[in-house]
């Protein structure tokens, strides 16, 4: 089973709202990732967690706050977003040891109004 | 500088025709190599990967890719395209050594399939 699940599938939020994106995998992967993808562009890495600890933050604005409560779950908390944050948010996971092939979830389509 | 290049932004083929999508990379040592496919509004699905060994790798959905070290290329091929193959295709690389987390993607090639 190479499934990564994400909820919700679609999310519309105002600039003053607080919302969360959720990601789950049961493949025993110990690295989990958040990507942002704008239309007609490749995914851009936002955060990486390794063994539930934040390993990489690609200079993401603080209005995005990741959380990894356990080895299967990854959250992305959203607050005071801007319209330009509207995008497809993808979660991925991989084994911690090489060769690190990443498996992606279906994404959450976020619209900020 | 390290980079991944997909020279073709958009390719159109007829159903049943053969397909080749190009990918070139520029890295000091051969990285790990991947092809992903993304249908509209969906996540990325791993088609195949190259780590070492046989330079012709087989993937899912009838796709294959050939690694050519001398050309720094990892081209994706399919002998007969189906309408359901219409999607965006991304080549991606992962450097060997270090933390090995950061996938670098090409800009993608959009495949249109004509009936």
Image (cartoon, rainbow, N blue to C red):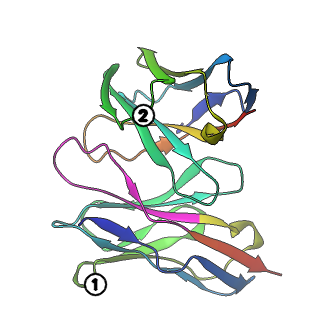
The residue lying at 61 percent from left, 86 percent from top is B18
Place residue B28 in its image quadrant.
Answer: bottom left
Of residues B70 and A112, the one nearer the viewer is A112
User: In this image, A16 relative to B98: left or right?
Assistant: right
Which chain is disc 1 placed on?
B
Q: Quadrant of the C terminus of chain A?
A: top right
Q: Residue furthest right?
A: B115
The correct choice, above or below, for A34 with respect to B13 in the image is above
Decide if residue A94 is on the left or right side of residue B72.
right
Quarter of the image with the N terminus of chain A in it? top right
- Residue A85, located in which quarter of the rendered image? top right
Is the magenta region chiefly helix, strand or loop?
loop
**What residue is disc 2 on?**
A60
Task: Provide residue B4's location: percent of width, then percent of height.
Answer: 36, 68
The percent coordinates of residue B71 (x first, y second) are 28, 84
- Give the magenta range: B89-108
Find residue A71 and report its horizontal and vertical position in percent. 41, 19
- The correct choice, above or below, for B87 with respect to B69 in the image is above
Question: Going 70% across and 69% down the picture, which residue do you hit?
Answer: B86
Question: Can you identify the residue that label 1 sits on?
Answer: B71
Q: Are marks 1 and 2 on the same chain?
A: no
Please report, as a chain letter, where disc 2 is located.
A
The residue drawn where x is 16% and y is 44% is B98
The secondary structure type at the circle numbered 2 is loop
The picture places residue B115, in percent across and down from the top left corner, at 83, 81
- Figure label count: 2
């Amino acid at each position: 089973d190479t499934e990564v699940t994400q909820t919700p599938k679609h999310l519309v939020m105002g600039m003053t709202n607080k919302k969360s994106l959720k990601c789950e995998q049961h493949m025993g992967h110990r690295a989990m990732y958040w990507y942002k993808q704008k239309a007609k562009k490749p995914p851009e890495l936002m955060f990486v967690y390794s063994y539930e600890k934040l390993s990489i933050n690609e200079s993401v604005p603080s209005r995005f706050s990741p959380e990894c409560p356990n080895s299967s779950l990854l959250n992305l908390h959203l607050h005071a977003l801007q319209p330009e944050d509207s995008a497809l948010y993808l979660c991925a996971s991989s084994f911690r040891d090489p060769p690190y092939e990443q498996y992606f979830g279906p994404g959450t389509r976020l619209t900020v109004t | 500088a390290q980079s991944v290049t997909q020279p073709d932004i958009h390719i159109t083929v007829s159903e049943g025709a053969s397909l080749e999508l190009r990918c070139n990379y520029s890295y000091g040592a051969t990285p790990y190599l991947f092809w992903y496919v993304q249908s509209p509004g969906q996540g990325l699905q791993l088609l195949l990967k190259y780590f070492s060994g046989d330079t012709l790798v087989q993937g899912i959905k009838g796709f294959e890719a050939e690694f050519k070290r001398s050309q720094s290329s990892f081209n994706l091929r399919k002998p007969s395209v189906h309408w359901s193959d219409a999607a965006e295709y991304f080549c991606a690389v992962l450097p060997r050594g270090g933390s090995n987390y950061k996938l670098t993607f090409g800009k993608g090639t959009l495949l249109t399939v004509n009936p």
